[in-house]
Amino acid sequence: MVSAVIYPKRHSALAKSFWQHTGDGISSRRAELCHRAFNDGFLAPRVDDSDDNDRVHCAYHKSIKGPLRYQKVRLTDGPEEPARTRADSLQEEKQQSKDDSILFVEERYGRNLDLSRAGQAKTAIRRRIAGALTADVDLNHMADIALMFTQRLINPRFPYIDTLKILEKWGPGCLFYGNGSAEDLDNLERRCEEGERYLALFCEFPGNPLLKCPDLARIRALADRFDFAVVVDETIGNFLNIHVMPHADIVVSSLTKVFSGDSNVMGGSRYYQALKKKMGTEYEDNYWAEDALFMERNSRDFVSRIARINVNAEAICMKDVYYPKYSSTRPFYEQYRSPTGGYGGLLSVTFRARAEAIAFYDALETAKGPSLGTNFTLSSPYTLLAHYTELDWAAQYGVDPDLVRMSVGLEDTVDLCSMIKRALTAVARVNEA
């Protein structure tokens, strides 16, 4: 079932904001299949006996094999399929041949599982994330966990833009501590002692883009004392480098990044039974089968890729960059670093003058874009992209408007170091001029 939301034009800005920050909607592969089904006449309106509104029923969910001329598919309801001309048939066979070729390449050389094994692919993904705790990993195509709360929330340290915007815009509001310092936690403790109550605290470990870590041990103590949940997004650190579950009620990770996909991981805590019961009644597996196949394929070498990225990132880092290893909050990171874990592949760098930042960014011989966790190194003028309309606000929390963020990939380490040196040479030329 695919549904659409229709709203008055005056609410366009709000609707766009909701879609932009939550990512709610169907995946591109699901949309592509539905669009193809619509063009092929496999989508038909159906009236539900209990509802007078027309519903769209998709009868295209079964995998159809072989040339179109041998396919005999009939809908049990809806209008009859219009007669097709020979030109239509030839065009459809041509498209089917193209689709079959793409599928063959993906399954033979890309090593995708067959579509009928999507359930097994999801099980494999869960096991990679949580080992034997497969029942404690829920897969989603988006992260909208903040939308279900009805009490105020807490967000310590400067977070990724969408996290904060969701907490602020939908629900009763958010108490934001942009620095996440000991003084901020002191303030939170005083508020709680004076009777203020909160449902949950959301934090990133480490944060994006400054790569600083909150004091999770103290946060856990406050949560136990004043009865609120702790939700940790460990996307940047990732669950091979760090293990934050002992001090979190919910761990969320954007598998779209290094792993490839989306996930909510529930850990053992005082809230475990209540959360597990709630998810058991409300969770809906809407993770599209084709997306699961691609995520399963992409994540098979996740462990070796993380190890390589850790080495590359450390190799190009200097002590003046924003990186967990060289951060003032490194002691907090070390408390949760796995025995074989590194410091991740994300780092940020700032310069003394805008001209230097421009020269460095322009000279960087990497792909340029706003995402992270790709197998190739990716750079972006992060603050300008994420906070263009609120640069002064971001600056008060130490996020420089000319900050350059780099997501390190799998390239040869020597080549990466040489690339950074060439970019720094461009900066030196600016100073000489």
Image: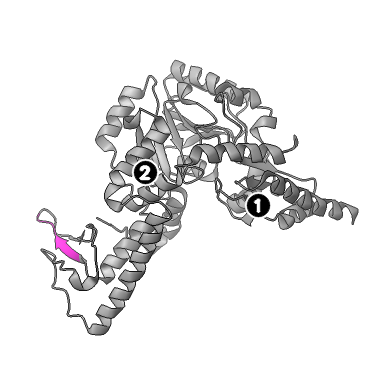
Label 1 sits on residue: 381
Q: Position of residue 105 (x, y in %)?
A: 40, 60
Cα separation, mark 2 vs mark 1, equals 29 Å
Residue 18 position in % (x across, y down):
43, 51
Q: Earlier in the sequence, mark 2 or mark 1?
A: 2
Mark 1 residue element: loop
Q: Which residues are magenta?
A: 44-49
**The N terminus sits in image quarter:** bottom left
- Count neighbours of disc 2 (C-alpha within 10 A) and say few if under 14, some if 14 to 19, many if 20 or more: many
Q: Residue at x 86, y 55 (%)?
A: 429
Query: Horizontally, is 177 left or right of 326 in the view?
Result: left
**In the depicted view, which residue is nearer to us: 262 or 409?**
409
Q: Which residue is situated farthest in the right direction here?
A: 432
- Rendered location of residue 159, percent (x, y): 56, 39
Q: Is residue 397 visible?
A: no
Q: What residue did someone put label 2 on?
A: 140
Marks 2, 1: nearer the viewer: 2
* Amino acid at dot 1: Pro
Q: Which mark is residue 293?
A: none
- Near-viewer residue (326 or 339): 339
Kind of element beneath mark 2: strand
Task: Say if the magenta span includes residue 46.
Answer: yes
